[in-house]
Image: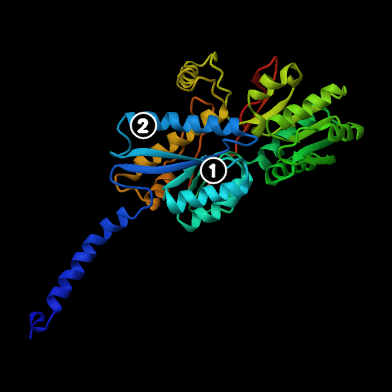
């Protein structure tokens, strides 16, 4: 008796073999957001809320690099399709936008999502659908800790950068008493906790602390209270208009402490909108500010190209979005023609050290256990209405 003598066995075996051979192809086609000719990715920005200027600049930086690679033929024959959603700098809106992108639009990954509370709301939904959170515009530690297969972060944390830079500047200025004003959310808490840790490292402590709600415009009571505490070193967990408002109020009542804030306030809008009173303000930074007249030919060329395309000067959010897409492209190319979530993750983990770029980004490296590309930062100060680097990367 042979196999052919068993009724129906041969057709069954042939069908099984056919399915087995087709399985790899089916698996490849099943990767969300990846088709024969296209990779669908998304970004979630604030386009209508309190940091809409950041969101629009980040979106433009991403779009510039996407347009460039598509004009060159794409990645292994696939063009990038970029979808953009607005979170209004609101965790609830961020959650709704994420749900739409991962379940309806079926994107491959979400890049440069802005805001710490917004990312914290979005990540559980993303991870359930096997969607990567790629280099969010947040320096919250949750972006990389605890490590997760689908997390990749490029911005050193608010906590760690404030811890180092606050301690260093406090000692350098010979300050006697620190105080703080911060946004009453995950972002503000991270900034102040980092500052408090840095002060503790050098045997000092945070004195008076006060908060504000997102969207606040009047800081007179908080600034009066902080001045009355005899503080000479003010730590701000603020973003744009809150930074300008707080410093402006301090100048108005004749209070001139050393003032330092996080990378979230490292924007030319501080001195453009706040005027001369913003001189002297310090902020943590990881990129060089991309002024169009810099003595850096590559960066100056890029900044003018950006301005020609979008009709406005770029910012570090523009450069950050562009740099994020550059790394996405490198990893997707390395992943090969059969792009899947797993092949992309493995490519990111095997890129080795990604060199510093023209924007001043520190070298980045990712491994299976290291989801933050770099811990380095520098300190910049507004001098004569312009950001000046005052310390090297550390």
Where does residue 72 sit, x and y in percent of width and height? 31, 29
- The answer for how far apart the CA atoms under marks 2 and 1 are is 22 Å
Q: Which of these two is toward me, 343 or 214?
A: 214
Which of disc 1 and disc 2 is earlier in sequence? Answer: 2
Q: Is residue 232 visible?
A: yes
Asked if the residue under mark 1 is in contact with the one under mark 2, i.e. CB atoms within 8 Å, the reply is no
The spot of residue 301 in percent (x, y) is: 46, 17
Would you name the residue on which mark 2 appears?
A: 69
Number of residues whose C-alpha sits closer than 10 Å to that of mark 2, classed few (under 14), some (14–19) or many (20 or more): some
The residue at 26%/61% (across/down) is 23
Q: Is residue 78 left or right of residue 227?
A: left
Q: Is residue 131 above or below residue 209?
A: below
Residue 125: image location, x then y, percent = 52, 55
Position of the N terminus, as image quadrant, is bottom left
Q: How is the image coloured?
A: rainbow
Q: Which residue is mark 1?
A: 153
Task: Identify the disc placed on residue 31.
Answer: none
> Is 137 in front, or is 166?
137
Vertical side of 314 occupied by 150: above or below? below
Res 293 quadrant in image = top right
- Residue appearing at x 56%, y 34% in the figure: 55
Residue 144 in view: no
In the visual, does 344 lie left or right of 207? left
Which quadrant holds the C terminus? top right
Instruction: Residue 189: name its quadrant.
Output: top right
Label 2 residue SS: helix
């Amino acid at each position: 008796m042979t196999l052919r003598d068993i009724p129906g066995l041969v057709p069954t075996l042939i069908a099984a073999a056919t399915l087995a051979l087709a399985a790899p192809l089916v698996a490849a086609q099943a990767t969300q957001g990846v088709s024969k000719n296209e990779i669908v990715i998304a970004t979630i920005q604030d386009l209508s809320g309190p940091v809409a200027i950041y969101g629009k600049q980040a979106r433009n930086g991403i779009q510039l690099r996407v347009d460039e690679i598509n004009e060159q033929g794409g990645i292994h024959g696939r063009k990038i399709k970029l979808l953009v959603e607005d979170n209004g700098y609101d965790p609830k809106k961020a959650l709704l936008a994420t749900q739409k992108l991962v379940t309806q639009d079926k994107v491959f990954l979400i890049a440069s999502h802005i805001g710490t509370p917004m990312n914290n709301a979005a990540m559980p939904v993303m991870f359930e659908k096997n969607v990567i959170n790629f280099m969010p515009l947040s320096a919250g530690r949750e972006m990389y800790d605890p490590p997760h297969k689908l997390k990749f972060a490029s911005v050193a944390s608010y906590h760690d950068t404030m811890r180092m830079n606050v301690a260093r500047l406090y000692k350098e200025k010979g300050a006697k008493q620190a105080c703080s004003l911060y946004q009453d959310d995950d972002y503000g808490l991270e900034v102040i906790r980092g500052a408090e840790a840095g002060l503790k490292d050098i045997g000092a402590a945070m004195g008076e602390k006060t908060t504000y709600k997102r969207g606040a415009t009047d800081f007179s009571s908080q600034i009066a209270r902080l001045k009355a505490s005899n503080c000479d070193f003010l730590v701000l967990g603020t973003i744009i208009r809150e930074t300008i408002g707080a410093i402006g109020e301090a100048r108005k009542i004749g209070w001139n402490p050393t003032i330092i804030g996080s990378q979230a306030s490292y924007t030319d809008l501080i001195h453009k909108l706040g005027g001369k009173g913003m001189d002297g303000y310090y902020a943590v930074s990881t990129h060089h500010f991309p002024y169009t007249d810099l003595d850096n030919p590559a960066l100056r060329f890029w900044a003018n190209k950006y301005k020609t395309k979008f009709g406005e000067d770029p910012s570090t959010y523009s450069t950050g979005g562009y740099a994020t897409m550059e790394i996405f492209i490198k990893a997707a190319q390395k992943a090969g023609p059969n792009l899947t979530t797993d092949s992309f993750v493995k490519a990111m983990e095997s890129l080795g050290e990604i060199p510093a770029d023209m924007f001043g980004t520190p070298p980045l490296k990712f491994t299976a256990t290291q989801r933050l590309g770099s811990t380095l930062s520098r300190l910049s100060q507004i001098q004569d209405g312009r950001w000046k680097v005052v310390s090297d990367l550390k």
